[in-house]
Amino acid sequence: MKSHKSKILFLGSFLFFLIVLGKITSEASSLAHGISKYGSLKYSPNFQNFNYVNPNAPKAGSLRTAVLGSFETLTQTLQGTAPEGLNLTYDTLLVRAADEPFSMYGLVAESLEISPDNSWILFNLNPNAKFHDGTPITPEDVIFSWQIQKDKGLPRSRTLYSKVEKAEKIGQRGIKFTFKKEDSEELMDPERPLIMGMMPLYSKKDWEGKEFDVVTLKPFLGSGPYRISKFEPGRFIEYERVKDYWAETHPVRKGLKNFDLIRYDYYRNANVALEAFKAGQYDIIHEADLNRWKNVYKGPGFTDGRIKKMEMAHTRPVGIKGFVFNTRRDIFKDRRVREALMLMFDFEWMNKNLFDGGFKRIESFYENSPFKAKGKPINGEKDLLISLKDKIDPKILEEEALTPPQYDGSGNMRAAQARALPLLKEAGWVLKNGILTNQKTGKPFIFEILLSDPQYEKLALSFGRALKKIGIVVKVRMVDSAQDEERRLDWDYDMIFNWWASSLNPGNEQRLYWTQKAGQTPGLRNYPNIQEESVDILVDKLATAKTEEELMTTGRALDRVLRYGIYMIPLYYSNMDRFAYWDKFGMPPYRPEIGPNPMAWWAKSSNPIK
């Protein structure tokens, strides 16, 4: 799913797509019902349901929400954008526990076994697992799902699933995945078994004679709690609950996915989407702009209580989002240029005037998490960086972790200009008649900020006005999601907005974000084109960390190195979730710290929680 193309109005993390990564420890027996990163599993083999659900929630009603953007295909392919909610239609071997961030439990896999060195994992299929047409999910289907996604899936899928050396059927219901050992690895990557557990499962028979990697509007045969019932590309898609879903009472599914119908309506404009919500055209909206939250979320529905507002603090990592430099472009190759532009971004003024002071500045690639580097490197983090001293700038070892500048919010940028212009001069740029000009070529400093989400336009325009003061011309261009994706695949941009998600367990997905290979592979997400050997080494160490201490130490070292490179201008975050919803839902009393989960809600009825 291309998250930068479909900006859903309630956070995707509430649907729990965050990847579970890290060291694997299974229960003491050779056959386990789940996997935990550290120690024992919270839920025993005979658990009945997760603690954050109402197991007696009624199955009824509908949940309608909204998405900004469009979709063109019903498959996950580079040729088009897939719709939101597609994951509702297929099952996976394992499922994550939302209140236990380092653990996963079996769904299609009834049990599992892992080798002591993580070189292979064996999944034993649940004999009840079946597709929507009633045919069983077989080892052949699982192997086909791996093979087709490795060969023809999205680039990130190809990268992850190519780590499997072979897949083989064991007995009647077993599938064994044996992993490759890379030359750079001292030990096998412990994350790979988890990645296989989260793989979407497809029917081999259903896909016979069909092209997997082309645009299609014909739904594939699924196995999940919902199937596609109705859709109109670019306008809406509806998923109906499968009445004879095989895992309806399974412990990892009980109390979840309670609506008979889930619908996503697509909008091009956030303001239009909000007015549609107020008119009752859909049920729930997430608002990130505090100024809008205070001043626009008003009207009859709010006054008479039909619409409720919810504010909740959360403790989940927020990842990093910002305006990203494309260092493939000559004007952004020099770090001094990137530093000068970062100095000219007045977050404090924008926060006060555009967002009513409702945000905090992102400083880290792992903001709001224990992986954020602080101060100067010490102890194990310092030792790790010393081992890379011939591959990093010595200042990384000597100075505090780089943070964006802080201003007083007045909008007076003279101090910033006084710091930025000398840096630009050192990099070969001088002011001539008010225009920043390259001393060698005589060309003016002009670049384009490419956007597909209107909510960031006012930030880009404000940034452009600030840069004009030092002679830089900024053009802000809005495009639709299809154009945005096409230009990203071709690396045809100067600067873009992007958001990289993070979890409490960063690991293999970091290879898709920051490594040299990811910067050279279309469809992966190294948009700034980071080409640092030290980053590759730290990403490898992060993905293969064997202890929590090693994970934390490596994550902070990686954060420090990435921040020093100034590959983007970080924007903002909030540790508050703000929702408005029509008062038609029941909710469990217990909510995981990562935030509310609408998929655990249900349509109101007289049935009490038991």
Image: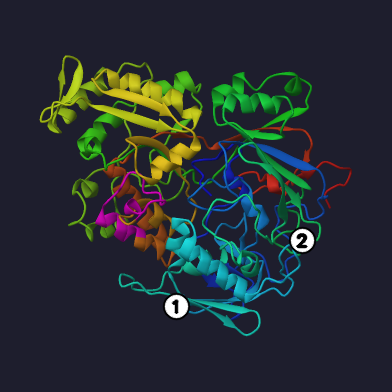
Image coloring type:
rainbow
Name the residue furthest left. 440
Q: Is residue 312 left or right of residue 418?
A: right
**Residue 507 visible at all:** no
Tell me, for residue 245, which label it has, or none: 2
Determine the residue positioned at 46% across, 18% down.
353
Q: Is residue 171 left or right of residue 349?
A: right
Question: The magenta stretch spans which residues?
Answer: 518-539
Where 154 falls versus 287 (above or below)?
below
Q: What's the amino acid at mark 1? A: Asp
User: Residue 78: where, in percent of width, then height?
Assistant: 48, 51
Query: SS at mark 2?
Result: loop
Crowd class of label 2 (few under 14; some 14 to 19; many from 20; radius 10 Å): some
Residue wearing tag 1:
117
**Magenta stretch encompasses residue 524:** yes
The quadrant in which residue 547 appears is bottom left
User: Residue 459: where, in percent of width, then height?
Assistant: 42, 25
User: Residue 136: where, in percent of width, then height?
Assistant: 71, 72
The CA distance from mark 2 to mark 1 is 36 Å
Q: Is residue 462 left or right of residue 597?
A: left
Query: SS at mark 1?
Result: loop
Q: Nearer the viewer, residue 21 or 398?
A: 21
**Residue 178 visible at all:** yes
Name the residue furthest top. 433
Of mark 2 and mark 1, the one earlier in the sequence is 1
Q: Nearer the viewer, residue 586 or 322?
A: 322
Q: Nearer the viewer, residue 118 or 526?
A: 526
